[in-house]
Image (cartoon, rainbow, N blue to C red):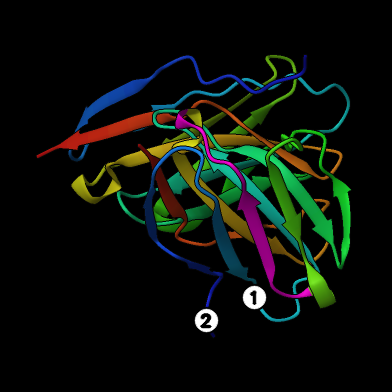
Amino acid sequence: EAGVVQSPRYKIIEKKQPVAFWCNPISGHNTLYWYRQNLGQGPELLIRYENEEAVDDSQLPKDRFSAERLKGVDSTLKIQPAELGDSAVYLCASSWGSGANVLTFGAGSRLTVL
Amino acid sequence: AQSVAQPEDQVNVAEGNPLTVKCTYSVSGNPYLFWYVQYPNRGLQFLLKYITGDNLVKGSYGFEAEFNKSQTSFHLKKPSALVSDSALYFCVENQGGKLIFGQGTELSVKP
């Protein structure tokens, strides 16, 4: 079974440009997460979906970040316009439920903003 | 703010020696606690979790962790370290469905 698939793995853009990341979770997992990991730090939650509904987006910078999970499967995270401080690894994870269940993480998308 | 703390940025051990990676949590009541590991250029991988029951939890690759409620700790341990255990380790606390990660501890195992 394929794990959580993310693309692209690497992206380099100029500041003020838009960028989008895509995530395909494990089949059957209803909960999907986007995390951001800055260099030398632990991941921080951006948004959590349960099926199509965003149940926690309190840490998503809504002025420039947006996310969607149409049909409750794949998800896209967009940044527009990107800033230098957005350089980080964007991690997608999925799980069945969100209590004590284990998250399965994708390999991440490394963004560099120049 | 509630958080999970990993007091050591880096832990160095010799191969074959026991290792401990420390973690303290802050959620009152009965916390859900996890350890994840991140190898270079690879995704985060689950090692083990504590939900309830036995305070000593066994996980993948020979790792175990001891839940101590009085000290609010959840230290990761392994009796005999391998060079291949070298990686970044995260202690994680589940707060209402949201995973809160510690800042990570870099484990370096030398031959």
Query: Residue A34: horizontal and vertical position, in percent?
Result: 65, 51
Residue A79 lies within the magenta run: yes
Q: Amino acid type of disc 1?
A: Ile
Name the image quarter holding residue B87. top left
Q: Residue at x 65, y 71 (%)?
A: A25
Q: Residue at x 58, y 66 (%)?
A: A22
Secondary structure of the residue carrying tag 1 is loop
Name the image quarter holding residue A109. bottom left
Mark 1 neighbour density, 10 Å: few (under 14) some (14–19) many (20 or more): many
In space, the residues marked 1 and 2 are separated at their CA atoms by 7 Å
* Residue located beneath label 1 in the image: A26
Q: Where are the magenta residues, as a range?
A: A73-84
Q: Amino acid type of disc 2?
A: Ala
Question: Which of A78/B95 is in front?
Answer: A78
Query: Residue A77: horizontal and vertical position, in percent?
Result: 65, 56
Chain for mark 1?
Answer: A
Secondary structure of the residue carrying tag 2 is loop
Q: Residue at x 85, y 21 (%)?
A: B28
* Residue located beneath label 2 in the image: A2
Query: Residue B25: horizontal and vertical position, in percent?
Result: 68, 22
**Location of the C terminus of chain B (image quadrant):** top left
